[in-house]
Amino acid sequence: MNNFQLQQILMMAAAGYPDVLAVLVEMLRRNAANLGLMAPGIPDQLAVSNGVDVTANGLPLYYAVVKRRGDMFRSPMAFGRAVQDALDETTYANCLDRLRLLRVDQLPGGFVGLTLTLGSW
């Protein structure tokens, strides 16, 4: 991700509409190897558009599907904690609202489903 794209994300965050998928891609670009995931841009990398669902209380939910490279984490909880730490690092470094990882799903074919929502620091 170049500086222009990061600047666009910052502008969207200032407007109150962050591009969650772009933030997730930046996090994966920087941390894919540490998390045992494939970096964005490969044919196996899937993503679902922003704002797929909204809970009854108006909380936006964002979904993404990521291809795993291997099984680096034995515990789903440890994997989720590592993903949340990487998200926190990315959003904090770019002055964006926090993204919270709500759920990690093990999907067939070596994919992982991530459910995210907006959070607060």
Image: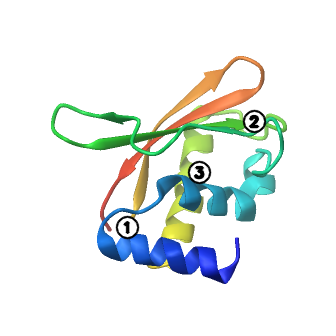
Q: Which mark is residue 67?
A: 2
Q: Are marks 1 and 2 in contact (CB under 8 Å)?
A: no
**Do the CB atoms of the residues marked 2 and 3 lie less than 8 Å apart?**
no
In the depicted structure, whether residue 19 falls above or below residue 81: below
Q: Is residue 9 left or right of residue 59?
A: right
According to the picture, the residue beneath numbered tag 1 turns out to be 97
Three-letter amino acid code at disc 3?
Answer: Val
Of 73 and 107, nearer the camera is 107
Residue 7, how many percent across, how many down?
54, 81
Q: CA distance from mark 1 to mark 2?
A: 25 Å
Rounded to the nearest angstrom, the CA distance separating label 2 from label 3 is 14 Å
Report crowding for label 3: few under 14, some 14 to 19, many 20 or more residues within 10 A (C-alpha): many
How many numbered tags mark residues here?
A: 3
Give the structural element (helix, strand or loop) at label 2: strand
* Residue on which the image places disc 3: 83
Label 3's element?
A: helix
Residue type at numbered disc 1: Asp
